[in-house]
Amino acid sequence: MYQYDEIDQALVDARVDEYRDQLSRRLAGALDEDHFKPLRLKNGLYLQLHAYMLRVAIPYGTLSGAQMRMLGHVARKYDRGYGHFTTRQNIQYNWIRLEESADLLASLATVEMHAIQTSGNCIRNISSDQYAGAAADEVDDPRPWAELLRQWSSFHPEFSYLPRKFKICVIGSETDRAAMKLHDIGLQLVRRDGELGFRVFVGGGMGRTPFVAPVIRDFLPTAEFLSYCEAILRVYNRYGRRDNIYKARIKILVHELGAAEFTRQVEAEHAHVKTLGIDAPEAEIERIRGFFAAPAFEVLGEDYPPPAPPVSTSREGGEFELWVARQVAVHKVPGYRIVNISLKPVGQIPGDASAGQMEAIAELAERFSFDEVRVTHAQNLVLPHVKASDLPAVWAKLVEIGLADANLDLASDVIACPGLDYCTLANARSIPVAQRIAALLQPKEAELGELKVKVSGCINGCGHHHAGHIGVLGVDRKGTENYQLLLGGSGAEDTSLAQILGPGFDETGIVNAVGKLTETYLSVRTDGERFLDTYRRVGAAPFKAAVYGEPVYG
Amino acid sequence: MGEPFAIDARALGDLEPDVVIGPEEDVRGHAALGNHRVIGLAFPKWRDGRAYSSARILRERGFAGDIRAIGDLTVDQLVFLKRAGFSSVAAERPLDAAVAAAALARFPFVYQRAADGALPAWALRHAQAEAAE
């Protein structure tokens, strides 16, 4: 993992000092809320419905054991004993006291963590693949590039007052585990004739106006990585719309200009910008890469122990075997496995973990995964480097802390935003709907196979409803909560946007409708066909008929 | 507005700007800016960050006079203004000189190259490495 040098640490410490000064002026009455608000937001502190919420950055979703333990400590000391892992691989605490917020940030700084740029119209935390450095299909490790971006984007003088927030994702495999094409910039590491570079996607996003990002550069040499990002951001900063907050994301600019004209402008700007000495030298890439060198894996041989069995849809076999079949993925090193930890026990809040659970996972990481934990955009956790023979011990501990569910990518692995239970932007509650859908589908989820259900409590789409095989969008209709149903989305390498099926429902109605969708799927699928593929094959009609009855709504 | 706050020695606080360019204008479209001594870049709202790009572009084109940020600005934008190439600030509410000086001195390093000539962290790291060899 990356480790701060004195430069990184000095910057984070200076930021804490600055915030402590601002907070003390606020508490003393020298600074009013109007002037304090943008300052606290720049440090990740939002005022929500009931309390302050702090969003802590988890750079590209990677944590050490000590960092995870600190997140548990923060939950215990500054919150009500919980934290909420988000769809951007960050963590949020929902019950923060303003007067303690500077101490909290100082605590985070002791383990090289911060909340810088987790809010505001700036470049946000960089997201990435939770299997980075462990996946067998990786062209190159995305983490060094994400760290380079983290540094380049931190306190960027030109891009701190963008038209709107800005999200960048870097992945290193053809398999997309990070919804890369639904980011403002998506970067995919590729090789061409042996040379490493990036395929560059710009203008994806969800929210009110969803788009899958088009490719604007098929092969960007790594030596021009930062200057090309600088050119994209400069075009956006200058020409992105500022007249309407709902049209201010870069996806609207790309859409209105057209990808070809946007590309032309970026290329023209880049021809100039790349002469300015913005790109970091190879020596810096190598320095950062050094922190992500493979840990000291033992040489275990191909057949030690036998590879994990293929994912089974059967409920037969013991609980441990079921868990292995569902939660454990192939590792690039023989004898090692990637372990997915579900934060979706049925009846719980998706993505929540208690202080005790975080501390236990920190210990698991230290003992069994070379001191590493990852956070996924689906609000789960990953131990990336576990020796296959240690799986029983890991599983036993997860059983003890209540996180041994075997539901990765199944119907009860629901993504949900905090919704109206916490969020000032929400129009409807997400959590209870997610919980009820999970409870309804869980008994038959093994039979249903891969089924990604995603619930957002407002059109901003933090619950990724547009990328759901089944998406649920809560809206406000004349003062009551109403839920729209969407079908056919994907955030994977086959990215697509879910489409609205028909009129919305109340809370009970949407849960029942989702149930009917799954019955329809089971009746029309072919052998081995995922829900998403069935929908793509047969279209919306049979699902509409099942949910709304005949005649089918236009 | 009182005397503009001087960020660096290029500030010409006793002169009015020769031209004030709005955030929606393309500084590349202005002819003969090199003849000016003070170019003002307007900030009608602090949230509108287009003038940061304008200032950098002017410096990248070699403008060596005073670039003045004019409008809705506070001490919290100072470091960004300085790094983007501004040399003076005429804020609607005058900046407290002591608070401004502290803000400019707070962050000891920078991560990226911009218009102020500060060496990015990667340049310092590898200069140190070379010196140590």
Image: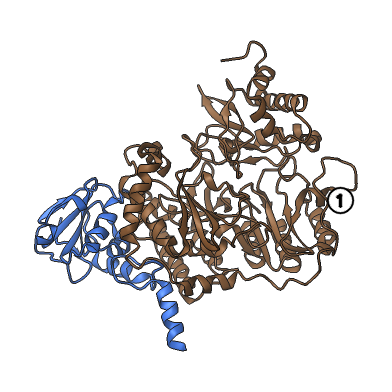
Chain colours: A brown, B blue
Give the quarter of the image for residue A512: top right
Residue located beneath label 1 in the image: A321
Which image quarter is the C terminus of chain A in?
top right
Instruction: Indicate the secondary structure of the residue bearing disc 1.
Output: helix
Residue A425 in picture, x, y percent from top left: 49, 38
Using residue A1 as the reference point, say whether residue A362 is left or right of it.
Answer: right
Using residue A80 as the reference point, say whether residue A327 is left or right of it.
Answer: right
Residue A446 in picture, x, y percent from top left: 80, 38
Give the quarter of the image for residue A393: bottom right
What residue is at 43 percent from the left and 55 percent from the top? A42
Residue A368 seen in the figure: yes
Q: Is residue A345 above or below residue A385?
A: above
Q: Nearer the viewer, residue A427 or A158?
A: A158
Residue A541 in picture, x, y percent from top left: 64, 20
Q: Nearer the viewer, residue A116 or A34?
A: A116
Residue A184 in picture, x, y percent from top left: 46, 47
Q: Is residue A373 above or below residue A492?
A: below
What residue is at 57 percent from the left and 62 percent from the top? A143
Residue B86 seen in the figure: no
